[in-house]
Image (cartoon, rainbow, N blue to C red):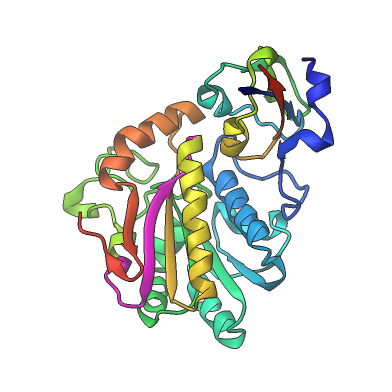
Amino acid sequence: MAKAKGAIVVNNETCKGCELCIPVCKENVISMTSVVNRKGYHYAYMINPEACNGCTNCAVVCPDRAITVYRVKVPA
Amino acid sequence: MDVLEIIKPENQVFCKTKLMTDATLSYCPGCGHGTVHNLTIEVIDEMAIAEDTIGVAPVGCSVLAYDFMNIDMTQAAHGRAPAIATAISRLWPNKYVFTYQGDGDLAAIGTAETLHACNRGENIVVIFVNNGIYGMTGGQMAPTTLCGMRTSTSPYGREIENMGSPLKITELVANLPGVFYATRQSVHTHKHARKAKKAIRKAFENTRLNKGVSFVEIVSNCNSGWKMTPLESNQWMVDNMFPIFPLGDIKVDAKLKKS
C-alpha cells in the first residue's frame, strides 16, 4: 500500500502563534519556535518532519491560512 | 524522503485561496473569524461564483471583511446587513448575496432586520459568528452572553433576573417559514471546520436554487474578550457554550429537525 509523506511550509510573517494547529496534528509534527517574527509572535514549524503525512488538518484550522501543505505518495 | 523533495508546486494539496487578499487578518491570534472568512471564500472559490457573489460586511470585529475578501463587498450600518442584502438580492436576483455578522450586530442591534428578512424569506445567506460577547468594543455583554458569564458590563456575571437569558437566535429564526436552512457549527478543530464548510456550501447552493434564507451560525471563541489563551478559550467554549448552543442542523430543506 502506498504511504503518504507530507510537509508543511509556514508563512512566518502571517503566523500569529495561536497554537491551534498543534493539538489537531495526530503525528505531533508541529511546535512553536523560540524566536519571534516581526510582529513578536512565535510561529509554527515542523519539529518532527519525518512524521508528517500531509493530512491538512493544521491548515484547515489555521485562522490565518499561514500553512501550505504538500503531499506525495511513496511505495511502502 | 527529504522535505525539500516533497515541497514542490505539483505536490501542493492545500494553500490559502487566491480570493483572499494578501492583507494580514486584523483578528486576534486564534480567533474563529479568520477560519470562517477563509471557509466562506473557499466555498465561493470552489463553486466558481466569485464574479456573481456580493457580500455585506457588518459593524464589529469583521467590519474590515471587505479588505480581506477579494470579491464585491459592501458595508452596512450596525445590524442592517440583512436589509442591505435584501435590496441587493431583489435588484440582482441572479447574484449570490451573503451577510457576515457577529452576535452584537445580528442578535442585538439588528434583531429587527434579521427577523424580518428571515420572515420575508429573502434569497440570501446569513453567516452568523456567535462568540457571546461584543469583541471589538472591549468585551461588553451581548444578548448571547451566557448566564453567569463575566464581561466588562456584567462584572459579577450575567444574572437572569435583570439581564435576561442568552438569546438563541438560530432556533428563533428556524421557526419562521422564510428560512429554508438553519444550522449551528463551530470551527475550533479540523473536523468541525470541515463540517462548517459543508454547511456554508449547502447554504450557497440553496441560494442558487432560490430557496430563501440560509442561516449558518458558527459558535466561535473570543480569547481576548474572554481573557484566555486560544486553546483555553476553545476548551471553555466546548465546556460552556455548546451545552447552551448545541451544534447541528436545526432546519434542513424547510423542515425542522426534531431534537
The answer to if B187 sits in the magenta stretch is: yes
Which is nearer the eye, B220 or B146?
A: B220
- The correct choice, above or below, for B240 with respect to B96 in the image is above
Left or right relative to A28: residue B160:
left
Stretch of the chain drawn in magenta: B173-189
Q: Position of residue B216 (x, y in %)?
A: 44, 59
Tell me: residue B130, above or below residue B74. above
- Residue A29 highlighted magenta (yes or no): no
Choose between A74 and B99: the one closer to the eye.
Answer: A74
B251 sits to left or right of B126: left
Residue B49 in view of the camera: yes
Most extreme residue toward the left is: B161
Considering every residue shown, the one lying at the far bottom of the view is B91
Q: In the figure, residue B217 lies in which quadrant?
A: bottom left
Q: Is residue A18 above or below residue B14?
A: above
Position of the N terminus of chain A, as image quadrant, is top right
The image quarter in which residue A37 lies: top right
The residue at 54%/29% (across/down) is A20
Instruction: Please provide percent x and percent y for residue A52.
Output: 64, 20
Residue closer to the observer: A24 or B9:
B9
**Figure label count:** 0
* Residue B114 shown left or right of residue B10 in the figure: left
Q: Residue drawn 64% across and 71% down?
A: B54
Horizontal and vertical percent position of residue B131: 42, 46
Q: Residue furthest front?
A: A1
Q: Residue at x 59, y 38 (%)?
A: A60
